[in-house]
Amino acid sequence: MASFIFIYRAGPDPVPADRVAENREAWRAWNIALQEDYGIRVAGGKLVTSSGVSEYSGDVRGASMVEFESMDAAVEVATRSPNLAFGGSVEVLEEFGTSR
């Protein structure tokens, strides 16, 4: 099995207030499907570059470390990520040296 990182990016608009509960339940089900307790959630931070340190203003909202037989299998699962319903995206990255 190969290891992959799913990086979840938010869409341009926040989850509407009347769909927050639905979104939370979708993420709970997603974590169960990926067999992870909680995933990695993020909310802000710092951006460090050779020029200095600034506030992170990007759209990364979390990540998961998962295992699949292939990139195709990982991508197929990522197409069901809850954040896609709200304009978000998922980067599917294979850990270096884990493919067969």
Image: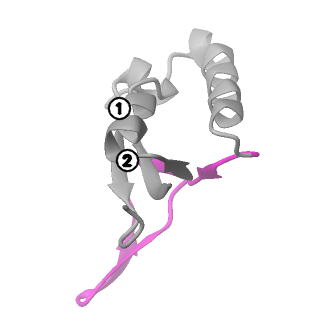
Is 11 placed above or below 7 here? above
Q: CA distance from mark 1 to mark 2?
A: 8 Å
Q: Residue at x 37, y 27 (%)?
A: 13
Is 49 colored magenta in this rendering? Answer: yes
Task: Say which mark, if any, is on residue 59.
Answer: 2
User: Which residue sits at x=36%, y=74%?
Assistant: 54
Q: Is residue 20 magenta?
A: no
Three-letter amino acid code at disc 1? Answer: Gly
The residue carrying mark 1 is 11
Q: Amino acid at mark 2?
A: Asp
Q: Quadrant of residue 23?
A: top right
Marks 1 and 2 in Cβ contact (< 8 Å):
yes
Whether 61 is drawn above or below 95: the answer is above
- Tally the numbered discs: 2
Q: Could you say where residue 35 lies in the image, as x and y percent from the top left? A: 70, 41
Magenta stretch?
Answer: 37-62
